[in-house]
Image: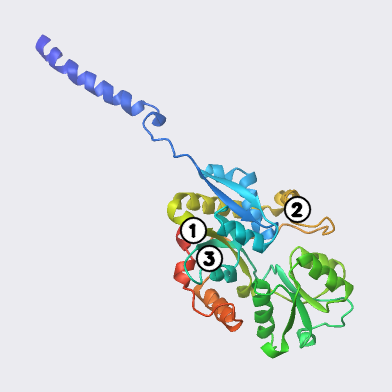
């Protein structure tokens, strides 16, 4: 009996040790998460960036183990200079911009829509001046329309009007790059028509501008995108994944309760004080532009002489980070 007890004792010690190990706190055996990578975002003060601002405010980036530093920029050229100099890692831009970046070599990739029109949300409007007497698309034939040349605004203007029956020869535009200038010229009657995004489109209609046609009629032509430098994507894929996951959570929160985030519009100076009653728009859930959308923008860019060669969709759109 004594010998059996001696033989059993080591076995009990081993079993006891194993049991204690199994009951130990998980943190004692888990590897701590790596330090979060900081992603620098060059952002214009536009509504398309609201989910990024919300994700920052709600701590969603930290939740997904990524840090985000927002670098405010005042114009698209300034944004592009910051990106080209490597002073920022990502941005909100549009397909045309991505194509111009990648025309010679792949410099950036789209990882998600930032904003997109739908049948319920327009975001862009072709507006007539209150003094113009224009009330329908036919009235825009041969009329100079204020736009920003070489951008999604010009692409959208052409495609919307063509879809409603105007030929390219019927469409006349004039370059007015600054949105506030475009708005003022429209309301004063110096421009008979102009294309404006929200909230400026909303503000113009409040002051009598006439909505002739908007992107909700043909939503496939209107979107913006979240884009990162390819070098950053290759070096920090998990940080990009965390960023996209945080934005996805922010979009879900905004779409569920937009009024909760109305303060973001004023905190980030995204709406002018005079745009009373403007509400936070809805945002698209996880998706990237389609091949068909890309091909149509490419065809338009080549028609306009912005590009002389094809730019591959597969090299420029990266859907692998979508949840």
At which x and y percent is residue 199?
Answer: 76, 63
Indicate which label's residue lies in the foreground, 2 or 3.
Answer: 2
Q: Quadrant of residue 150?
A: bottom right
List the residue tagged with mark 2.
269
* Circle 3 Cα neighbour tier, 10 Å, few/some/many (<14 / 14–19 / ≥20): many
Mark 2 vs mark 3, CA separation in Å: 27 Å
Which residue is at a point 69% across and 90% down the rendered structure image?
Answer: 169
Q: Nearer the viewer, residue 84 or 36?
A: 84
Residue 1 shows in this picture? no
Colour scheme of the rendered structure = rainbow
Circle count: 3
Q: Nearer the viewer, residue 65 or 250?
A: 65
List the residue tagged with mark 1.
322
List the residue tagged with mark 3.
288
**First of labels 1, 3 by sequence position:** 3
Q: Secondary structure at mark 2?
A: loop
Which residue is at a point 69% across and 85% down the rendered structure image?
Answer: 164
Q: Evaluate if marks 1 and 3 touch, with contact meaning CB atoms under 8 Å apart.
A: yes
């Amino acid at each position: 009996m004594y010998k059996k007890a001696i033989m059993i004792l080591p076995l009990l010690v081993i079993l006891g040790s194993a049991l204690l190990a199994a009951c130990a706190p998980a943190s004692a055996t888990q590897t701590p998460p790596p330090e979060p990578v900081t992603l620098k975002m060059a952002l214009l003060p536009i509504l398309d960036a609201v989910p990024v601002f919300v994700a920052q405010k709600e701590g969603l980036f930290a939740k997904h183990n990524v840090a985000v530093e927002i670098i405010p920029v005042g114009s698209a050229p300034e944004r592009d200079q910051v990106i080209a100099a490597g002073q920022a890692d990502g941005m909100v831009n549009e397909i045309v911009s991505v194509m111009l970046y990648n025309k010679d070599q792949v410099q950036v990739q789209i990882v998600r829509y930032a904003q997109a029109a739908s049948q319920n949300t327009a975001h862009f409007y072709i507006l007539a001046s209150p003094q113009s007497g224009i009330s329908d698309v036919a009235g825009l034939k041969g009329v100079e329309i204020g736009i920003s040349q070489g951008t999604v605004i010009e692409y959208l203007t052409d495609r919307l009007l063509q879809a409603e029956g105007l030929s390219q020869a019927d469409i006349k535009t004039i370059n007015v790059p600054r949105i506030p200038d475009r708005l003022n010229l429209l309301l004063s009657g110096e421009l008979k028509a102009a294309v404006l995004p929200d909230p400026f489109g909303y503000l113009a209609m409040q002051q009598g501008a006439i909505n002739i046609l908007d992107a909700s009629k043909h939503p496939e032509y209107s979107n913006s995108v979240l884009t990162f430098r390819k070098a950053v994507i290759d070096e920090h894929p998990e940080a990009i994944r965390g960023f996209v996951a945080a934005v996805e959570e922010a979009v879900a929160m905004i779409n569920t309760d937009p009024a909760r985030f109305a303060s973001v519009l004023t905190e980030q100076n995204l709406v002018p004080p005079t745009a009373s009653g403007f509400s936070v728009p809805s945002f698209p859930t996880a998706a990237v532009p389609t091949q068909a959308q890309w091909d149509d923008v490419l065809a338009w860019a080549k028609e306009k002489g912005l590009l002389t060669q094809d730019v591959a969709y597969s090299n420029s759109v990266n859907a692998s980070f979508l949840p």
